[in-house]
Amino acid sequence: MSAGPYRRPVSTFWWLRRRSYFVFVLRELSSVFVAWFVVFLLLLVHALGSGRYQQFLALSASGWMLALNVIALLFLLLHAVTWFGLAPQALVIRIRGRRVPQPWVLAAHYALWVVLSAIVIWVILGG
């Protein structure tokens, strides 16, 4: 019976020691809220299809649902911003054999986000 190598115990709150660890954990947690928005939108589609749209609106207007969706929106924004921050490192684009600078890739992501958001707002407001 041999004792294995010594392993220092790790605190449950190891991720609070550094800001980068904390942001990492928040980003991972944000995936739960991404899933929530998918479920919420599926419930909306179901309510539209089944004639229960007014009940869905009443549920959506409740205080706890508004709070949940505001928190989810903040986590989705964190998820998007951190994803865009990582994209230039993971996405290597070459034009004529030269790598596109990382700030250009990041700027392209944000520009596309703004354009698509403007199109969605235009469609929602009736074009």
Image (tube, rainbow, N blue to C red):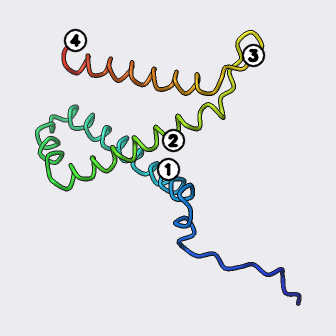
Residue at the spot of label 2: 82
Q: Amino acid at mark 1?
A: Arg
Real-space Cα separation, disc 1 to disc 3, in angstroms: 32 Å
Q: Amino acid at mark 4?
A: Gly
Q: Which mark is residue 98?
A: 3
- Residue 123 location in percent, x, y? 26, 17
Report helix, strand or loop for mark 2: helix
Labels 1, 3: front one: 3
Real-space Cα separation, disc 2 to disc 3, in angstroms: 26 Å
Labels 3, 4: front one: 3
Which comes sooner in the sequence, label 1 or label 3?
Answer: 1
Which comes sooner in the sequence, label 4 or label 2?
Answer: 2
Report helix, strand or loop for mark 3: strand
User: Is 96 drawn above or below residue 78 in the view shown?
Assistant: above
Which comes sooner in the sequence, label 4 or label 1?
Answer: 1
Which comes sooner in the sequence, label 3 or label 4?
Answer: 3
Real-space Cα separation, disc 4 to disc 2, in angstroms: 31 Å
Real-space Cα separation, disc 4 to disc 1, in angstroms: 35 Å
- Residue 35 location in percent, x, y? 41, 46
Q: Amino acid at mark 2?
A: Thr
* Mark 2 neighbour class, 10 Å CA radius: few under 14, some 14 to 19, many 20 or more: some
Labels 4, 1: front one: 1
Residue shown at 40% from the left, 42% from the top: 76
Residue at the spot of label 1: 27
Residue at the spot of label 4: 127
* Mark 3 neighbour class, 10 Å CA radius: few under 14, some 14 to 19, many 20 or more: few
Real-space Cα separation, disc 3 to disc 4, in angstroms: 40 Å
Residue situated furthest bottom in the rendering: 1
User: Is 96 drawn above or below residue 21 in the view shown?
Assistant: above
Report helix, strand or loop for mark 1: helix
Asked if the residue at tag 3 contacts the one at tag 2, i.e. Cβ–Cβ closer than 8 Å, the answer is no
